[in-house]
Image (cartoon, helix red, strand yellow):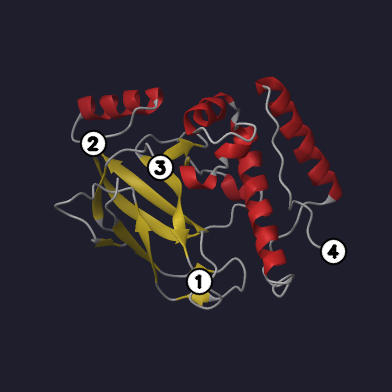
């Protein structure tokens, strides 16, 4: 899209050093920013116009079609400098009428949400750590940047092919892949920091049984689609 607005939230906790931020501001592609309006700042309670969800993949269908929660674009810690951290935004959609609501739902189901503006109220903005199944309960959409399309496509970066595969996965499979991606990313961070923060974050690596269960699931998905999904850092550094 090329143009950005900003979200502002409080109480963001760094997943690495655990520093608690009084206020965090980060970019968003969710709103209708364009050449005429951008660089606006939105907080909880503000009214926004979202221009669709084409930069997001469905994780779990919303229980209420006017209330959606997204795992959002990245934010960075002012203390240790770690960026690419996960955020959460909860929105209440405000459709003008029944026709607009039906059009939005149809576009959503077809995966063609682009250029379909909808009014919404921001209910919540906060940090998020998706490191277990419970943490993903009620999470409806995840930003494309947080899905490893290259690994999902067997080493080929193809977001169109990746989304097709993603949409054919069960909700449970999607959540396990997202958790595996997160743990892989986090363990890479621990290693690159010479394990300085190991044990501080509270994010637990897979146990042997959890890792075995995860790898069995990944291999089953791979066989189904003829791909190989592999993460290098799932075992916590000894």
Residue 165 seen in the figure = yes
Residue 143 seen in the figure = no
Label 3 vs label 2: CA separation?
13 Å
Task: Indicate left or right for 231 with 17 as reference.
Answer: right
Above or below — where is 90 with respect to 165?
Answer: below
Nearer the camera: disc 1 or disc 3: 1
Q: Which residue is mark 1?
A: 77
**Residue 186 on image: x %, y %:** 65, 59
Q: Which residue is mark 4?
A: 238
Using a 10 Å C-alpha cutoff, classify the residue at mark 4 as few (fewer than 14 neighbours), some (14 to 19) or many (20 or more): few
Sequence-wise, the earlier of marks 2 and 4 is 2
**Quarter of the figure that contains the N terminus:** top left
Nearer the camera: disc 2 or disc 1: 1
Q: Which residue is mark 2?
A: 95
Q: Residue at x 54, y 31 (%)?
A: 162
**Quarter of the figure that contains the C terminus:** bottom right
Q: Which residue is mark 3?
A: 68
Using a 10 Å C-alpha cutoff, classify the residue at mark 2 as few (fewer than 14 neighbours), some (14 to 19) or many (20 or more): some
Task: Indicate left or right for 15 with 214 as reference.
Answer: left
């Amino acid at each position: 899209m090329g143009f950005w607005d900003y979200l502002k939230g409080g109480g963001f906790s760094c997943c690495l050093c655990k520093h608690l931020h009084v206020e965090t501001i980060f970019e968003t592609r969710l709103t209708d920013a364009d050449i005429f309006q951008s660089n606006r700042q939105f907080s909880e309670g503000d009214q926004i116009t979202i221009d669709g969800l084409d930069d997001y993949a469905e994780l779990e269908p919303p229980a209420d079609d006017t209330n959606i929660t997204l795992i959002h674009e990245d934010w960075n810690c002012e203390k240790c400098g770690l960026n690419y951290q996960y955020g959460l935004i909860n929105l209440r959609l405000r459709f003008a009428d029944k026709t607009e609501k039906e059009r939005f739902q149809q576009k959503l189901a077809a995966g063609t949400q682009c250029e379909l503006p909808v009014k919404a109220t921001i209910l919540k903005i906060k940090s998020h750590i998706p490191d277990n199944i419970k943490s993903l309960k009620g999470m409806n959409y995840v930003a494309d940047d947080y899905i490893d399309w290259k690994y999902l496509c067997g080493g080929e970066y193809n977001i169109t092919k990746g989304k097709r595969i993603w949409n054919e996965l069960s909700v449970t499979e999607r959540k396990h892949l997202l958790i595996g991606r997160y743990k892989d990313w986090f363990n890479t961070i621990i290693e690159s920091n010479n394990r300085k923060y190991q044990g501080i974050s509270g994010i637990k690596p897979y146990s042997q049984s959890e890792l075995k269960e995860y790898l069995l699931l990944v291999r089953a998905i791979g066989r189904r689609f003829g791909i190989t999904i592999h993460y290098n850092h799932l075992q916590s550094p000894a």
